[in-house]
Amino acid sequence: MKLSAILDSLVFNVRLFAFLLALPLAATPTYTSTTSISLTCQWIDVDQPPEGSPFLISADPGSGCQFPYGGTSVGGNVSGPLSVSGGIGFPIIGNATFDFSSHGTDTAPAGSVISLTWLWVSSTDLAFAESDANLVIDGQVVWSGRHADRAFPYGAVNTENVGSFECAADCTCTAGVEAKGSGHGGAAAGSTLLVSVIDPPANIPEPGTALLIALALCGILARKR
């Protein structure tokens, strides 16, 4: 094989590889997330707190409360696209808050069908917890869900089949989830939205239709002769 042919083949393969890499990038939604967490600690020593020391002090949730201050535990994260969770534990002293959210935006062609399944957790014991989710198409809220302060069973994951929504024209879709809670007792919140987009079917004639068209063309050509 000539050197020029080898180079041409190499350039073609590189271009093809770059094109295949660009395909998932062009079809990947844009995600944004926000996180918020706070913790306060309460004086628990038998002695009186130092003069001028506040009864409640702010603390780094990662390090917790240092003796002689005590408090609850708090944590959570954005574990993936449109999946958030958080929780507050015991003991019942001090106070904590958490708020985790994630949003994704994508486009869909006319005739596409968007299906949603919502997994949520909202459990509390002497605290507050809330899970939220929504879907917005072309600036209009077509669905939203909210669950708050479900006591038992604690930490249970619930599945909700939301349904399907069709895009009459090319549309922009934004889906969002949020999990938040506050208090000094137990709280668990989680929100995961499973989004499935089915593209419209291609307008390909059925085999029988194609055969009829071919026969009609043959008839037209025969008459012209």
Image: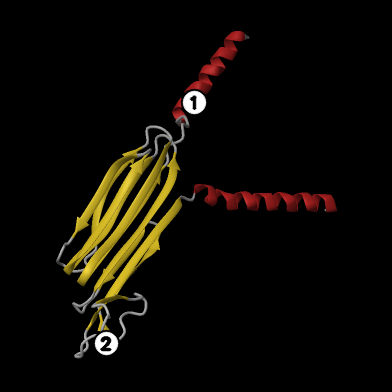
Residues 18 and 212: in front is 18
Q: Which quadrant of the figure contains the C terminus?
A: top right
Q: Which residue is mark 2?
A: 68
| Residue 46 % position (x, y) | 19, 90
Quarter of the figure with residue 86? bottom left
Q: Badge 2: few (under 14), some or many (20 or more) residues near its Cα, within 10 Å?
A: few
How is the rendered protein coloured? secondary structure
**Disc on the earlier residue, 1 or 2:** 2
Of all residues, the one furthest to the front in this rendering is 51
| Residue 69 % position (x, y) | 26, 83
Q: Secondary structure at mark 2?
A: loop
Q: Secondary structure at mark 1?
A: helix
Instruction: Please tell me whether mark 1 or mark 2 is closer to you in this view.
Output: 2
Three-letter residue code for mark 1: Leu
| Residue 187 % position (x, y) | 22, 68
| Residue 129 % position (x, y) | 22, 63
Residue 211's tag is: 1
Task: Left or right? Give the position of 87 relative to 77.
Answer: left
